[in-house]
Image: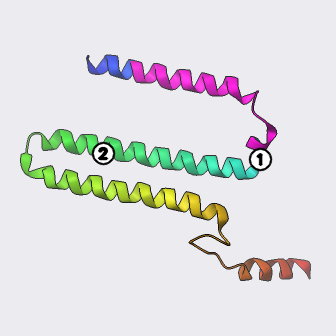
Amino acid sequence: MTGHAVAGIVFICVFAGALGGLALRTRLPDRYFDADSRDAMALVVALVSTVAAMVLSLLANSSSSLMNTQESEIVVSSLFVGALVVAGALLLVVELRHGYTGLIQISSAPLKSALAQIGR
């Protein structure tokens, strides 16, 4: 299969997914459109774009390393660093949903101080 055929198939799949999302939007309950859901989706979109950028950079790196086999160590270390970045992003997405009680705890003192200043 040529590169153009693969690109065409990927384009069709992404376009069909977008059309499917538009069709399903009218059937979803309103709770999926509140501010928390939109914030979670923004985090997911950022994560997906970061992973896509890493995949493209690793693809470029691996294609150049085919010419030089000594760069295989760089590819392995790049994959390891990429896996750590994705794992860290997923940890932040999961933990910041419950910022006051989770593994990463945020102090409520600055928020209380700001609310006290607003209340004056």
Where residue 51 appears, x then y in whole percent?
41, 46
Closer to the camera, 49 or 72? 72
For image coordinates 18% across by 55% down, the residue present is 74
According to the picture, the residue beneath numbered tag 2 turns out to be 57
Q: Is residue 19 left or right of residue 77?
A: right
Compared across the picture, whether 61 is left or right of 109 comes to left
Does the CB distance between marks 1 and 2 fall below 8 Å? no
Q: Amino acid at mark 2?
A: Ser
Residue 85 vertical position relative to residue 15 in the rendered view, above or below: below
Relative side of 17 to 36, left or right: left
What residue did someone put label 1 on?
34
Q: CA distance from mark 1 to mark 2?
A: 35 Å
Q: Which residues are magenta?
A: 9-32
Which quarter of the image is occupied by the N terminus?
top left
The residue sitting at 57% across, 72% down in the picture is 104
Going from the N terminus, do you reach mark 1 or mark 2 first? 1
* Looking at the image, residue 116 lies above or below residue 13: below
Q: 22 or 84: which is nearer to us?
A: 84
Residue 112 in the image, given as x and y percentages of width and height:
79, 80
Q: Nearer the viewer, mark 1 or mark 2?
A: 1
